Image: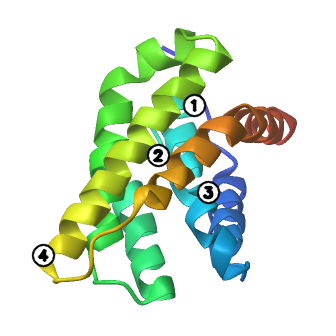
Amino acid sequence: MALVKQQGGFIILLTFVIALALMMIPIPEWAEASRPQWLIMVVIYWCLALPNRVGVIVAWLTGLVLDVATGSLLGQNAIGFAIIAFLVLKLHLRIRLFPQWQQALSILILVALYQIIMLWAKGFTGQSSQTWAYWLASITSMLLWPFVFTVLRGVRRFYRVR
């Protein structure tokens, strides 16, 4: 059995940093609810593309960084990212075979599940309930998935990330 040299760890980290920056860029308050969930989409992509390198631990650490960066309850995003990464790792062989429109529907479901987990965590802290606009992030993430997938796949191939 030939050993495949793993390379591109810096590129994977860089995509996480860029996604975090996209999550932190200030946008108008009226558009805040429709901000795509860039970081969870990048986690999902890398779990699909390289399930042996990016898994639950990386997702949990990424969520922890998002918790610190946004000032949310410590561990809130971390547990959500870890659960989504676990589901993606369990289903990655199926999801990878889907055409892009079905992958986008999978992203809608996964991001909506992540948002349910976040809503549940916010309920424990006594924060106010959300309106229907809370779910817009799932829809915009679904619509942007083909773009995110194509860009990250191009980056992975160009830099030969294995």
Q: Residues within 10 Å of mark 2 (few under 14, many from 20)?
A: many
Q: Quadrant of residue 150?
A: top right
Q: Classify 26 as above or below 33.
A: below
Q: Classify 148 as above or below 49.
A: below
Identified at 87% across, 37% down, the residue is 158
Three-letter code for the amino acid on which mark 1 is drawn: Ala
Quick check: can you spot residue 3?
no
Q: Nearer the viewer, residue 24 or 8?
A: 24
Three-letter code for the amino acid on which mark 2 is drawn: Val
Identified at 38% across, 74% down, the residue is 64
Q: Nearer the viewer, residue 89 or 135?
A: 135
Q: Which residue is mark 1?
A: 49
Three-letter code for the amino acid on which mark 4 is drawn: Phe
Q: Which residue is mark 2?
A: 54
Q: Position of residue 136 (x, y in %)?
A: 54, 52
- Mark 1 near mark 2, Cβ–Cβ under 8 Å? yes
Q: Earlier in the sequence, mark 3 or mark 2?
A: 3
Per the image, label 1 sits on a secondary structure element best described as helix
